[in-house]
Amino acid sequence: MEVKYINPFINAAQTVFKTMLNIDAKMGKPILKNEKTTSGDISGIMGLAGDRKGTICISFHDKGALFVFKTLVGEECESINPEVVDSIGELTNIISGQARKEFEQTGLNLKAAIPMVVVGKNVEVNFITKIPIISLPFYFSINNGTQEIMYLDFSFE
């Protein structure tokens, strides 16, 4: 996969974290994934179609998802509930929209499906492409300084 298809996703994740959550998300080393499963406990999944096709999956562990919910909404939540699920779906939509905006500036037009959110570990995802899945880990700190991670997994051709 060409770098020109990876950078919009990196830029989108970091921009959205900074502007919407006031968090500096540091990207770790990209990983090629062989397994077609979610990387976290709660994941927003969205298909992309148009000039190219692909799937993105944004995954958080429970603590990270609860922190994102609290930061976005301003309310504490003890466990994953429908409101937290909605916030992860919305964050998936926003990151996808930011990446699509950057793609449009290069003349690449994409449409996005409505995000679906799944709760559970190692949920199988049918990435609609034949090329490898790239996993971009983004690290961020939550309230007590604990390091959390968001995985942005995608396959895009």
Image (tube, rainbow, N blue to C red):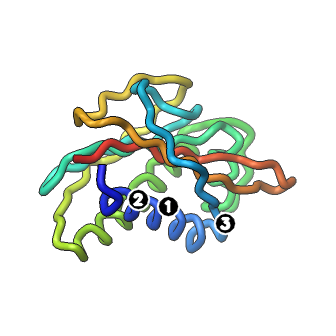
Task: Tell whether 122 sits left or right of 97.
Answer: right
Q: Would residue 67 be found to the left or right of residue 30 on screen?
A: right
Task: Report whether residue 135 is seen.
Answer: yes
Distance of label 3 from label 1 (alpha carbons): 11 Å
Find residue 4 and report its image quarter: bottom left
**Residue that badge 1 annotates:** 13
Distance (Cα) linking label 2 and label 1 = 6 Å
Q: Residue at x 13, y 57 (%)?
A: 51
Is label 3 in a helix, a strand or a loop? loop
Residue position marked by numbered label 2 in the rendering: 9
Q: Residues within 10 Å of mark 1 (few under 14, many from 20)?
A: many
Q: How many marks?
A: 3
Estimate how packed mark 3 is, as few (under 14), some (14 to 19) or many (20 or more) residues with alpha carbons within 10 Å.
Answer: some
Q: Residues within 10 Å of mark 2 (few under 14, many from 20)?
A: many
Foreground label between 3 and 2? 2
Type of amino acid under label 1: Ala
- Please name the residue shown 48% across and 47% down the image: 152
Whole-percent x and y of residue 119?
Answer: 52, 30
Residue type at tag 3: Ile
Q: Which mark is residue 23?
A: 3
- Which comes sooner in the sequence, label 3 or label 1? 1
**Mark nearer the N terminus (3 vs 2):** 2
Q: Position of residue 128 (x, y in %)?
A: 23, 34
Relative to 32, is 132 on the left or the right? Answer: left
Q: Residue furthest right?
A: 144
Residue 54 to residue 118: above or below: below
Q: Nearer the viewer, residue 82 or 1?
A: 1
Q: The residue tagged with tag 1: helix, strand or loop? A: helix
Between 111 and 136, which is closer to the camera in this rendering? 136
Could you tell me which secondary element the residue under label 2 belongs to? helix
Residue drawn at point x = 86 percent, y = 53 percent = 144
Q: Nearest the camera: 93 or 133?
A: 133
